[in-house]
Amino acid sequence: MTYDITIIRPEMREEQVRPRGRDLGEDRRKALRKGLQTLHALEIMATNIYKCQITQEATPLNTALTNAMSNEMTHMQDFQTRLYEYGFKPGKLRGRFWVAGYVFGLGSRMMGTERVLKTGIWAENKAVEHYGKLLASAEWDDETRAVIEKDRADEYGHIARWKGFLERS
């Protein structure tokens, strides 16, 4: 399925939020919880990377970083919502991903534009890898699978965008 990656924040309606997976077996619920907590934590990190890379200048790169940050915030909300729908909570150690995002984002910004772009490519490649593993690791309901696939498509779009900026620099 193809997804429109120019949509930063897909519309979400009230009726789309509902309890999910409460009748599933313990092994399946454990796999879902692990996957959702991992994706949520990774999106916290990605949001902070971009947040820390944005400077005050009005540049095309800063606009693209702001778009990416907003998109990653949407992904973070996607997984936080799913966690609660399934009756789970975010991972207790998610704060370390916040710190890691801050370190990667600020550190790359201090090293210049090329490092900002390479950090973005690295982080998004890791995200795509995790999305693929997590899509295969659990039996997702169709709506959750579609959210995960759309978010993964967005990550591919970010990789292409950062590679384009690198080629032009």
Image: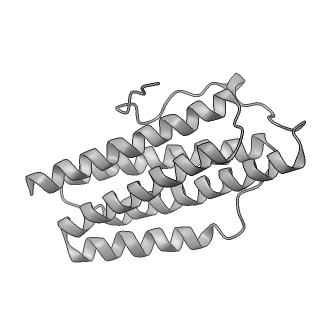
Say which residue appears at 62% left-offset and 44% top-offset: 136
Q: Quadrant of the C terminus?
A: bottom left
Camera-side residue: 165 or 137? 137
Where does the image place residue 36, in percent across and percent down from the top left?
A: 67, 50
Camera-side residue: 35 or 47? 35
Camera-side residue: 169 or 17? 169
Left or right: 158 in relation to 84: left
* Residue, far left: 168
Is residue 60 visible in the rendered image? The answer is no
Where does the image place residue 24, in percent across and percent down from the top left?
A: 87, 39
Is residue 56 visible in the rendered image? The answer is yes
Residue 119: which quarter of the image? Answer: bottom left
Q: Work out whether 60 lies above or below 17.
A: below
Q: Work out whether 8 lies above or below 101.
A: above
Left or right: 139 in relation to 55: right
Say which residue appears at 71% left-offset and 57% top-offset: 90
Where does the image place residue 159, in percent across and percent down from the top left?
A: 31, 49
Left or right: 68 in relation to 97: left
Say which residue appears at 65% left-offset and 34% top-offset: 144
